[in-house]
Image: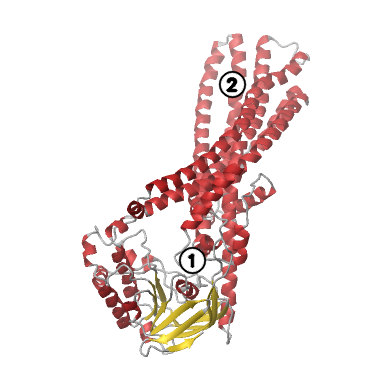
Amino acid sequence: MSEEQENLLSSSLEHRDDCIIDKDSDNGADTDSIEQNNSQQPKNYKFDMLFFSRLFSVLKILFKSNAIYPCWSTKKKARQNSLFWLYILFVTLAVLYEILVYFVGMIPSQFYTILTTKDKAKFGTFIIPCLLLVFVIAICKSLLNFMGGLFALKARELLTIHIQNQYLRSKAMYTLLTKYNKIDNPDQRITQDIEKFSETLRQIVTNLIIAPIMVVYYTYKCTMVTGISGPLFIYTYFVVGSYLSQKYIQPLVNAVFFKELQEGNFRYLHVRLRDFVESIAFCAGEDDERMRAQQSLDTLLAYQKTIVNKEFPLKVANESFSYLGSVLSYLIISIPLFMGVFDGKDASELSSIISANSFVAMYLIYLFSTILEQSSKVSDLAGYTARISELLETLNEINEKADEECRQSEKLSTSSGSNRNSIQTTAHTSNHSNAPTTAAITFRDVSLSTPHERRRRLKKLIVQHFNLTIHVGESVAIVGPNGSGKTSLLRALASLWPCDEGSIEISGASDVGKNIIYLPQTPYLIVGSLREQLIYPSSPTGNNGRCDSSRISSSTVKITDEEVLELLDKVHLRHLSGLIESYDTIYGEEWNSLLSPGERQRLAFARIFYWKPRFTVLDEATSAVDAETSEYFYNALKTLGTTIISVSHDPSIVNLHDTIVSLEGFGEYSIQSNTVNTPLVTV
């Protein structure tokens, strides 16, 4: 990769990183991981043992067995989760096709004999089976391509489901996107790179699925006619071609990888333009955005040009060897001919022998040429394999670490005393309306700092030795200047960030409905119906989603039309029912045009009124609605009996809370009662 390309890529990545720094400037990660990731220079991705190791790991997913069924089991469940039988059928069709190819290849030699002897009767009886054979091989070839399409489709399905399940495990996506900068554009790797990998694998498998076996067979047939000299010529031809292909493949692997990386960056830039179109228009920022888009496009085109340039010598070598094969086949057959092996044969017999044996030599050369021609596809496959495997390896690392933390948390929850980096829960089976008076969230001697700050690799202390107990029915406001860590404290509560010291304990957790619901400043509206919006997420858990594989699907959560209308009334959105076709009509981007920012926040509050959680956490959740509506929502939540934990800059909202936690920076904080307005704790 040239210095200019490295600079362009670095600039593009820096701009992309700038775009995802959050409002509190404490979006962070594990320090060790980030330092390692930030210090990485662009890698060289090679066609080497690491590639084969990664390819083998991906293939294990495609041909996986489980504890119940091996991959070769004929049970429906096993066949749904493995490519094995599809591959076997693929191989069978390929063998049948090669047999038909051999018989079709022998047709010209028979015609030479018939035509040179002018045998009309034999010609008439031979032409019909020849036509049938050609028709059958055409069907077989079409079936082979059809099976190849199914192979690619199934490979994409299995890989996507496997990676998607890992990616969307509890907190895994958040951890990947905030801590592992080396994994660029995971969305592209899942949606595009897997598809390209599957299609490239199909093309390679279609051409090479039984090539090694056929090479052995045609080597034997060629040796029977020409002796060892014929195969020796062909194998020398293949070795030279392989060397040249290997030499030209190596630079392509790296170029393909970084080209796909920049494809993702270019797509991401245009997605942001669409998402922030109004802000850009208000600021008249089109010229600046055009310059950034042009810079990103220039980087992408530079990589594409590199691939085109480096493919040229590879194509020259491959095409030269392909056409050279036709000449080489006649050179090989000339050896026994000029040595007198076929002396005594008449013209018709000699024509038949030359035709048959030249086909054998040409087909052996064709097999080797086909293998060489796959070199450019193999370079693409290596690039896609690197990108998919990097994502897989990182997700496995994240999920293994999360599983270990869950096991440790379960052990710690049975012990008493202070715990490091832990959030404990104590479950009860009753709903919050019948909750025991001991139900509470307890911050016990918590010290919290940002896992990192981008570019500076420094931790910023949020709170130190923080102690607070929030009982059911109470309301707590968290205030402080921008960047003081208000949202960071909520991240620790949600177990998105670990505590440096101490523990956060959630007692009286309910197994019915939602235990805690978080509402951010910008509500997340799903691609779905209004009915689905109101019950999102429809997978209630009793421990805030941690260490719990059980989920309730949306089909098991029922909400009637009357309940939908009642919820809309509670959040002053009854008019919304007249703007949509039905409560079950699916909308995506349309939600942004149907609802103003304030209406989206109101719709998010409807989820609280539906789930009736024990604890409600609000992060500037009413910033886009008027003061009267904000006060109405807070009073409604108190009537509901839910405990309120709020982050807000609005004094009128802060005054609605019983307790005020003020974060003052550098680990200092104060806690005061809103009724007496005197400090209870100052650190």
Looking at the rendered image, the quarter that the N terminus falls into is top right
Between 350 and 125, the one lying in front of the other is: 350
Q: Secondary structure at mark 2?
A: helix
- Measure the C-alpha gap from mark 2 to mark 1: 75 Å
- Give residue 25's mark: 1
- Give residue 107's mark: 2
Between 525 and 152, the one lying in front of the other is: 525
- Give residue 316's mark: none
Front tag of 2 and 1? 1
Query: Does residue 373 sit above or below 155 in this rendering?
Result: above
Q: Is residue 638 left or right of residue 257?
A: left
Give the x, y percent position of residue 603. 30, 67
Between 656 and 523, the one lying in front of the other is: 656
Give the x, y percent position of residue 372. 64, 33
Give the x, y percent position of residue 110. 61, 18
> Mark 1 belongs to which amino acid?
Ser
The structure residue drawn at horizontal position 59% and vertical position 68%, both measured from the top left corner, is 401
N-term mark: 2 or 1: 1
Q: Secondary structure at mark 1?
A: loop
The structure residue drawn at horizontal position 48% and vertical position 54%, both measured from the top left corner, is 187
Q: Is residue 612 left or right of residue 4?
A: left
Q: Residues within 10 Å of mark 2 (few under 14, many from 20)?
A: some
Query: Does residue 507 sit above or below 357 in this rendering?
Result: below
Query: Does residue 404 sit above or below 658 in this rendering?
Result: above
In which image quadrant can residue 67 be found?
bottom right
